[in-house]
Image (spheres, rainbow, N blue to C red):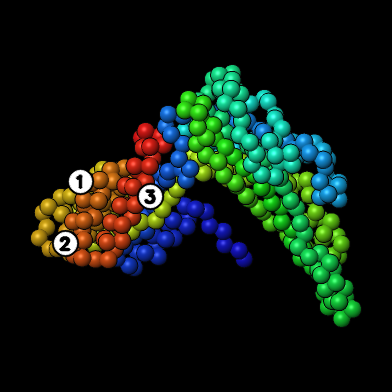
């Protein structure tokens, strides 16, 4: 019998597991800055496909019988994934350029010459945006991992009277490069390569059938192309994540009351309760726990400066490693907050 747990059930289970310890596991929603910083001056962008190859067909495309239109379709799917994820955030107002341009590298395998600024300015004016995100090159590859050896192994199993079921694995990869053009300063704010891959598996008693099932090449490449765009988008917009934090339990009195308030998501009430415990108590151990929990409440409420003040008090009162570790976490988040302000103005 299989046991299936929802996310809420898992969280409840964590609370039960910690019920015998001195702390409870709580979750905090944390906003992380984008890995790639794009100035907050840029509020609107257009996405352009400039990756269409125009050189002679490669040996690879001849062998695999890829359709000439596939290059455009896959790169367009990549940008579809990019735009779809960008639209889940309020960081940018996003538009798609109708134009599809040839890559400056004929085979679309690497960066070529940047776009002329006259063209960049014209496109930004046409689409009424501040900047362009340009897919400069795009290529894909699909491979089955050693299918010959897999088939030989299956035949050997049949000869020896063993079960002949085999598992075949294939990998789809994409290779691309992006530039971000900002016409106001005539500067390229970002230029770098971006790679992504995904692996599929199929099992069958017939190795040829397994490979045949696996090698739905078009489906695999379409999936990887779309996910490549989404993966890149995740690098240029701030995202929210859930992180685990400890909270000291209260066995009785106001410490226990603060715990119940926190579980009920009344964090302002919990902060008030723990502040009063800290101020009214003379025992360093209790003061340290109250200060630690007050720091947690401040973090949840978005006041990281006060969170750092409280966790420092917790460490001074009792010298626990937990407070020192939490202090380092808050320090890191304060540095991230400075980057967020640079990216979003928040």
SS class of the residue under badge 1?
helix
What residue does disc 3 label?
A: 28
Picture coordinates of residue 224, whole percent (x, y): 68, 47
Q: Nearer the viewer, residue 308 or 255?
A: 308
**Circle nearer the viewer, 2 or 1:** 2
Which disc, if any, is residue 317?
2
Specify which label sits upstream in the sequence, 1 or 3.
3
Q: Would residue 261 be seen by someone viewing this image from the given angle?
A: no
Label 1: few (<14), some or many (≥20) within 10 Å? few
Q: Residue furthest bottom?
A: 160
Residue pointed to by mark 1: 272
Residue 68: image location, x then y, percent? 82, 38
**Rendered view: 32 above or below 87:** below
Residue at (63%, 50%) from the top-left corner?
A: 196
Q: Is residue 323 visible?
A: yes
At 74% from the left and 42% from the top, the residue drawn is 107
Picture residue at 70% right of the left edge, 39% below the top: 105
Quarter of the figure that contains the C terminus? top left
Q: Is residue 153 above or below residue 303?
A: below
């Amino acid at each position: 019998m299989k046991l299936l747990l929802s996310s809420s059930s898992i969280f409840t289970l964590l609370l039960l597991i910690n019920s015998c310890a001195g702390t409870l596991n709580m979750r905090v929603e944390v906003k992380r800055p984008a890995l790639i910083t794009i100035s907050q001056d840029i509020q609107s962008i257009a996405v352009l496909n400039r990756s269409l190859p125009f050189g002679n067909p490669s040996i690879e495309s001849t062998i695999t019988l890829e359709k000439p239109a596939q290059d455009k379709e896959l790169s367009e799917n990549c940008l579809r994934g990019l735009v779809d994820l960008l639209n889940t955030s309020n960081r940018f107002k996003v538009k798609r350029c109708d134009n599809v341009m040839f890559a400056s590298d004929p085979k679309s395998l690497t960066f070529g010459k940047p776009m002329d600024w006259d063209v960049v300015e014209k496109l930004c004016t046409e689409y009424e945006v501040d900047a362009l995100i340009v897919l400069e090159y795009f290529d894909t590859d699909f491979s089955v991992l050693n299918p010959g050896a897999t088939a030989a192994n299956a035949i050997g199993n049949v000869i020896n009277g063993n079960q002949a079921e085999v598992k075949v694995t294939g990998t789809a990869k994409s290779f691309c490069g992006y530039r971000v053009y900002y016409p106001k300063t005539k500067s390229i704010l970002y230029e770098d390569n971006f790679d992504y891959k995904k692996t599929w598996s199929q099992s069958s008693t017939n190795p040829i059938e397994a490979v045949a099932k696996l090698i739905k090449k078009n489906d695999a490449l379409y999936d990887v192309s779309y996910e490549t765009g989404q993966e890149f988008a995740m690098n240029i917009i701030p995202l929210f994540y859930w992180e685990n934090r400890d909270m000291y339990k209260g066995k009785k009195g106001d410490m226990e009351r603060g715990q119940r308030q926190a579980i009920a998501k009344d964090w302002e009430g919990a902060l008030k309760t723990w502040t009063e415990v800290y101020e009214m108590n003379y025992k360093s151990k209790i003061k340290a726990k109250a200060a630690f929990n007050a720091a947690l409440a401040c973090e949840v409420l978005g006041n990281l400066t006060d969170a750092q003040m409280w966790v420092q008090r917790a460490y001074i009162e009792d010298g626990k490693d937990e407070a020192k570790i939490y202090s380092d976490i808050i320090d890191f988040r304060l540095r991230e907050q400075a980057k967020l302000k640079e990216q979003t103005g928040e």
